[in-house]
Amino acid sequence: MGFVPTMGALHQGHISLIKQAQRESEVVVCSIFVNPTQFNDPKDLAQYPRPIEHDIAMLESVNCDVLFLPEVHEIYETDQKWTIDLGGLDQVLEGEIRPGHYQGVTQVVKILFDIVQPDKAFFGQKDYQQCLVIQKMVALLKLKVHIVVCPTLREADGLAMSSRNVHLSAYERSQSVALFQALKLAHEAFESHSIEEIKILASNYLKASPGIALEYFQICRGDTLEAAVSKEGRLVALVAARLGKTRLIDNMFME
Ligand code: AMP
């Protein structure tokens, strides 16, 4: 059984995970659950898009076997407390800006795994830190599920597909490609420049892009997300920025 957990507002990025799951499993389960415990901003939770009819039609169009669409009270039957030591992975980058976010993510994914009991679960590289956090939880709790990380699907201009992209105004949408451009810039400069120079180059590019409020541009070790101090091993550049009220993240391996 292959499992694709989502928060709905499905797009082709989600569908690519379902197709990958179909290639590797006999039965594919997709869940749609907007998880309240991973939101630290109640407004963000309230405004999260929930086009369920559209989502069902998309899942039907790719013959996804099962949609699991639980209510909040079914997932959180009792007021369980949850804390897991993620070894600091939940304290940096997204975890620093969104305190408690990865505790909420691991909490819901553990509950979903317990209910669905998949052999494999498919996650998008788009949420790179989330992939590491889930892998860490699986290792810590010795869960019998194999985590498959799938590539990021992008719009034609490079913007990573995201359920949040619907909130972008036409102007913000046109500016949003700067995140991908900055990652590409870093990738192209990787051979010839130092890590510090690349960070400055990419950050300056984003700071000079109208409509973009940069939160971070970091180059980290791909396994621990510690700031990279040398070019050894697999490095990943991660970026987060706000466009108006919408917050976008993206990342790219530096190879
Ligand atoms: P979400 O509904 O945003 O929680 O995402 C559900 C799953 O889809 C997560 O594993 C995401 O990483 C993945 N995902 C989101 N956007 C993309 C994308 N553009 N390409 C591939 N996977 C994605």
Image: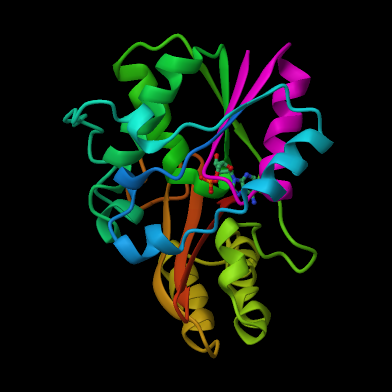
Q: Residue at x 35, y 11 (%)?
A: 142
**x, y (%) of residue 72?**
37, 37
Q: Residue at x 29, y 51 (%)?
A: 95
**x, y (%) of residue 123?**
56, 35
In the figure, 86 relative to 44: above or below? Answer: above
Q: Is residue 41 magenta?
A: no
Q: In the shown orientation, is residue 107 left or right of residue 50?
A: left
Question: Residue 99 versus residue 207: which sits nearer the camera?
Answer: 99
Question: Residue 234 versus residue 244: which sits nearer the camera?
Answer: 244
Rendering colour mode: rainbow
Q: In the shown orientation, is residue 13 left or right of residue 38?
A: right
Q: In the shown orientation, is residue 145 left or right of residue 101?
A: right
The N terminus, quarter of image: top right
Based on the displayed image, in which of its 4 quarters is residue 241 positioned? bottom left
Q: Which residues are magenta?
A: 1-29
Question: Residue 119 versus residue 36: which sits nearer the camera?
Answer: 36
**x, y (%) of residue 223?**
42, 36
Q: Residue at x 38, y 57 (%)?
A: 45
Based on the displayed image, in which of its 4 quarters is residue 197 positioned? bottom left
**x, y (%) of residue 121?**
56, 23
- Picture quarter with ligand 1: top right
Based on the displayed image, in which of its 4 quarters is residue 176 positioned? bottom right
Question: Residue 21 versus residue 7: which sits nearer the camera?
Answer: 7
